[in-house]
Amino acid sequence: MYFYAARQPILDKNKNLFAYELLFRDSIENIFPDIDGDEATSKMVEASQFHLGISEFTGNKPAFINFTLDTLTKDYPRMLTTDEVVIEILETVKPGKTLLNLCKELCSEGYILALDDYVHQKVWAHFYPYIKIIKIDWQETSIEQIQEIKQAISKFPQIQLLAEKVETYEEYNQALELGFDLFQGFFFAKPEMVKTKSLSPSQMAMAELLYETSKPELDLNSITSVFERDVSLSYKLLRYANSAIFRRRSEISTIKQALVTLGSGELKRFLGLMFATNVNPDKPSELINAAMTRAKFCELIAEDLKTPLDTSIAFLTGLLSLIDAILDESLDSILEKLPLAQEIKEALTTRKGVLAALIILVEQIEQAHWDKTSVVMEKLGLTKDKVVKDYKEAIAWADEQAQLQG
């Protein structure tokens, strides 16, 4: 059986990662509302226990998982620990004595309870002492309704407001001003403000290196000359090449020696790390993590296409697919300045061709648009198990890189 789960990040006020919501479907064909909520929840729990591994999929951050009244009654939440799950009570669950008693018990045991897509009713006041998070659909809730909710929960300081479906920085800032504590949506994956600016010498050096390593054959002389023009990058390369993880018998002391010793794969890995940490250190870590996940996913998928793509090109295309949000500049303006292969630029700007299809595929997975995912998979000739396996592996790899950076 296949388990399709996408994770959507939930960020705090400072745009740091707080948790993930896991969005589960039984199969790509079974899309809500066709699949029963009880079945979806039970299979999500089953997947986490026997197939998926919650901590493996969420990088040890809590997972928001939807629960219906039936799955709460059957004690499914207790199959997960208090550290790894936030119990999200679906908006379809009606407030009543049974639900209230379940909330009291779970809260007393240390579980965090959240109300999903909250629509205010006075009866929910009985539940407030046991609720830690209230999720509000930003696109469906008016400012007046939000103010009413804030007034209703004012005597319960433990309750945090989570703004869901926040799609722009303007919406994020507005929610922040209204007192929201947590934010879910793809605002962080879009440019904060579009402006024209020059790339720094370090950013240009990084762009040149990404271009050089995207070629089928590495030109060591060209790569060496780029490193030699940037003292900081050279120092980091030598430090990486001499790190304990490689267990070198003798110290590496020159740029060319480091490049030869690392080889193409490790060099690309190193540059990915440098890209993530240096291109814009003020950006949310989850944005960089998303770019790294896309890069690895595209690389893995490229190997299994009917007509295989160059994996280095696929990796770099995925890595740069969020560059406009990372640099806060329009994609066209950025790509004019970067010395990248034309096929990468065309994939990112025209959104046509096989490379672009890989980006579209991972975007649809991120947003759990399973019906659209199925269409792209069919066009690419990909199997379900391959896509699920590669997405999970890409997430694990990106999380590992994030830990190395930390």
Image (tube, rainbow, N blue to C red):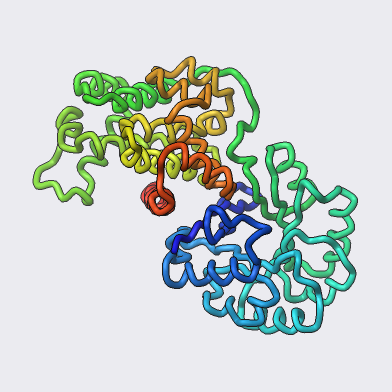
> Up-down: is 161 above or below 297?
below
Q: Is residue 186 left or right of residue 26?
A: right
Percent of width and height locating residue 266: 25, 39
Q: Nearer the viewer, residue 43 or 59?
A: 43
Q: Nearer the viewer, residue 24 or 230?
A: 24
Residue at the spot 49% in from the left edge and 72% down from the top edge? 46
Q: Is residue 122 left or right of residue 346?
A: right
Res 19 seen here: no
> Up-down: is 91 above or below 123?
above
Residue at the spot 77% in from the left edge and 75% down from the top edge? 129
Q: Quadrant of residue 123?
A: bottom right
Q: Quadrant of residue 108?
A: bottom right
> Up-down: is 58 above or below 48?
above
Q: Residue lying farthest top?
A: 336
Percent of width and height locating residue 17: 56, 53
Percent of width and height locating residue 64: 60, 63
Q: Is residue 330 left or right of residue 382?
A: right
Residue at the spot 61% in from the left edge and 55% down from the top edge? 31
Res 326 seen here: yes
Quadrant where the image shows the N terminus: bottom left
Q: Quadrant of residue 21?
A: bottom right
Residue at the spot 62% in from the left edge and 48% down from the top edge? 14
Percent of width and height locating residue 113: 67, 71
Q: Is residue 217 left or right of residue 232?
A: left
